[in-house]
Amino acid sequence: MRVTRKSRLQIRAQNWSFVILFLVTIGLLAWLSTRYVYRADWTYGHRNSLSPASVQLLRTLKNPLRFTAFVSDNQPLRDAIRRFVDKYRQVKPNTRLSFVNPETNPQETRSQGITADGELVISYQGRTQKVTQINEVNVSNAIEGIARAADRYVVFLSGDGERDPLGQHNFDLGDFGKQLQDKGFKIETLNLAATPTIPTNTAVLVIAGPQANLLPGVVNIIGGYVKRGGNLLWLGDPGPLYGLEPLAQGLGITFDKGTIVDPDSQLYGITNPSVILVAKYEPYNAITRDFNTATLFAGATAIETSATGGWQAQAFLKSLPHSWLATGKLQGEIKYDPKHGDKPGPLAIGVSLTREVKTAADDKNKTSESNQKSVEQRVVVTGDGDFLSNAYLNNGGNLVLGLNILNWLSHDDSFININPESAPDRTLTLSHTDQALISLGFLFALPLLLIVTGLLIWARRRRA
């Protein structure tokens, strides 16, 4: 190609056109970046984003959410809190954040019970919750607690050897009770022999494995509570019912005599055959819908149901097909023996019961017939109470299953399966040997390698 003055002008014009178009494109992209935002979290475990459980929780909130951070003139801490709250604002745009300086606002600081710099107060619909350690688990649990429409009182029966909801023994439910409190439930214990009345604000009554015969009057009070439409969680165990036979009869349930065993549990490293896994759940039950984590049950018995009293029953927990109900002693080699009453699996371990009941409406000026509303009464009966005990709560999905049961019983269906997970472990632990090898590598091996490589390149060039 012959280079002329005209061709040089054309090439120069093309170059300038390219530069101008490139700058215009960059400017348009910069302008679009002020209008639209795209974020992507490529970190391991998406630790810079909210978990799906927290996202699900925020989507259930209709009203604005407010964060108030009590921070002194500590700009790095304020920036860290602002970045943390931004993760919630991305999902719920009407989230607000404000800062209060404890040094200049001591009265408001005292009224909120603030004791340390950096504490957070979360407000929703006039209810507040203070968070001392700011992380997703604590903050999302606090939001779930204040998001409940009203106080949910979970009343545990006591006085007859039941599991203590705040106890620390292996068989107690202290860890589970603490989780319920973190989720916004109010925990109470009730000895009906001393106080023969179940409070009217009871959201769920819990019978957690009594170890002594209940008085007939106590059983009548429980039966009256159920008859009036109260929600009930009955954590049963193999063995006697300790006077609760009338309650079982009214619910149309029967506890089989024996303990469920599963030899396949040995495949998962479980040596005790009475400790069984539940890995498959009823997909059409609200408690276990979208729940697919294996749960562990120790010393469970089977439950049979019969339609009575208007109840609709559904088994939402079942043992695996290779399990069976052993009616003999669990000693030595355990074999399935139908001649002695053993029953083959799968067997029902947990049953949910529902029925429609009539309760008084809020408007007392209406006629007696119209002054009633229909509500769904809910009851859950399990053949094992150990799965929520301190010894087994953290195995598999036991905790999430227990929270799902309580949320369902208290008619907080929107909170089912909401359980924010802790951030993955990002710490790197090295032994003294590993640390020494890494140090020697950087101090001696790597510099020596560079020197040898340089000498080889120098020698090759010199021969050339």
Image: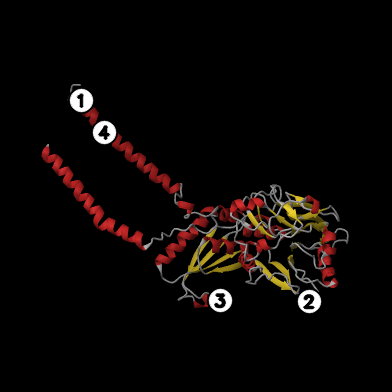
Q: Earlier in the sequence, mark 2 or mark 1?
A: 1
In the image shown, does 72 or 447 lie closer to the viewer? Answer: 447
Q: Residue at x 83, y 65 (%)?
A: 223
Q: Amino acid at mark 4?
A: Asn
Determine which residue is flagged by label 2.
Answer: 195
Counting from the top left corner in percent of width and height, residue 389 is at: 65, 65
Distance CA(mark 2)–CA(mark 4): 92 Å
Q: Nearer the viewer's eye, disc 2 or disc 4?
A: 2
Residue neighbourhood size for the residue with mark 4, other residues' Cα within 10 Å, grouped as few (<14), some (14–19), many (≥20) = few
Helix, strand or loop for disc 2: loop
Q: Amino acid at mark 2?
A: Thr
| Location of residue 171 (image quadrant) | bottom right
Q: Residue at x 81, y 61 (%)?
A: 229
In the image shown, does 138 or 102 lie closer to the viewer? Answer: 138
Determine which residue is flagged by label 4.
Answer: 15
Counting from the top left corner in percent of width and height, residue 220 is at: 85, 69
Q: Amino acid at mark 3?
A: Ser
Q: Earlier in the sequence, mark 3 or mark 1?
A: 1
Determine which residue is flagged by label 3.
Answer: 111
Q: Quadrant of the N terminus?
A: top left
Helix, strand or loop for disc 4: helix
